[in-house]
Image: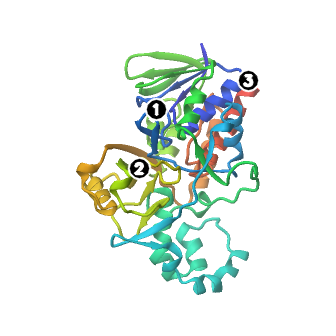
Amino acid sequence: MNDIIIIGGGISGMSLAHFCAAKGYQTLVIEKAPHLGGCIHSWYPFSDYWVELGTHTCYNSYVSLLHIIEQLGLRNEITARRKVSFRLLIENQIHPILNKLSIKDIMLRLWRLLYQRKTNKTVREFYEPIVGIQNYKNVFASLFAAVISQPAEQIPAVMIFKKRHQRNSKIPRSFTMQGGLSTIIDAIANHPKISTHLNTTALNITRNGNEMIVHTKNGENISSRFVALAVSPPIGASIIKKLSPTVASLLKQISITEIATTGIVVRSQTTTLPLVAGLIPINGDFYSIVTRDTVSDSRYRGFALHADAMVSNQQQLSTLADIIGIDTCEFLETTNYQATLPSPRIGHQKIIADIDHALKKLPLLITGNYFEGFALEDCVLRSKQESNKLTVVK
């Protein structure tokens, strides 16, 4: 019998699997998609070329993630991101971000950082007094939306741009992996204590004494001592509504947003678009375009456009063609991908505290990108914290 079944194979579920396997626990990861990774989604249109459709950057302040990378023997695959800038896109014209800001207004307000606290403030409530109303409206609202791929005004300020007190100075400040970030997920999955079931949808969980049973859509009943949820809040609520109505009710209170991503690859010589890390539209119908320009390649350029799920793939392709300045027939490869992201509101920390309190009585772990914050490091930290609960009963 498995020691633990983890439902969800994104970075939260796979980092939890890593921590559990490292402690000697037999771990099974169930994932409904045909691939692991979740919001880490490296697309390989060609065998030696990849484009990130989801998370695209790691930082040397992600010390917990870096520890996993070291344990996996991937240190030599860390690749510094080329220093190209994010730019603003205004009516299909590219502008440096600083050129559209009133720096004087910001400098006059920076003193507010000395006493301003994020607690119980939305992103807008915290940052607007610091940067100024016009700066926030003209630039920062779009910048924050690009960071989390959704409007950020009502998001709790504590959930983004978290200050991290440690950095690994031997690692580039911002980095990716030589073969894309999915390299990390694949390496975790290769651990001898970890097995995976792809294309497998968990329907619900029941409990029989000390045994937890996961019931799947294809009729399997899989047993373990512990079960962990590493899925979006509404899916998690559906899976555990019989096991724990209390936790299910709390998870239902967490809002989500659906985003759609369209990826394309073109030959480098077909576009005159300058090298950029990404483009952030002001008053556009998408959140951002992130490029592969941060990792040099003389043959191809890759782009990933992130938008609300209501924006059709065809519309996204047309937008990419207009901005890059070529016809869609010159796209070498295209793909699309959808993801579910948390969209927490003020009061979210109380919901999380109530969830953690209810979990104390259950052989159930919950991890995800809606506990500590949105970043990869936040996901890993939550998973590490949850994995420590298993050592008590080993």
Is 12 positioned to the left or the right of 31 in the image? right
Task: Estimate the spatial distance between the alpha carbons at disc 2 and disc 3, rounded to whole Å.
Answer: 48 Å
Which residue is label 1 attached to?
A: 239
Question: Which amino acid, mark 1?
Answer: Ile
- Colour scheme used in the picture? rainbow
Q: Mark 2 or mark 3: which comes first in sequence? A: 2
Which residue is label 3 attached to?
A: 393
Q: Is residue 337 above or below residue 104?
A: above
- From the top left corner, tell me how far across and down residue 191 is, in percent: 62, 22
Question: Which amino acid, mark 2?
Answer: Gly
Which residue is painted at 29% across and 48% down in the image?
A: 331
Question: Which amino acid, mark 3?
Answer: Val
Task: Estimate the spatial distance between the alpha carbons at disc 1 and disc 3, rounded to whole Å.
Answer: 24 Å
- From the top left corner, tell me how far across and down residue 218 is, in percent: 37, 19
Mark 3 element type: loop
Where is the N terminus found, in terms of image quarters? top right
Between 222 and 160, the residue placed more toward the observer is 160
Q: Mark 1 or mark 3: which comes first in sequence? A: 1
Is 16 positioned to the left or the right of 242 in the image? right
Query: Foreground mark, 2 or 3?
Result: 2
Which residue is label 2 attached to?
A: 302
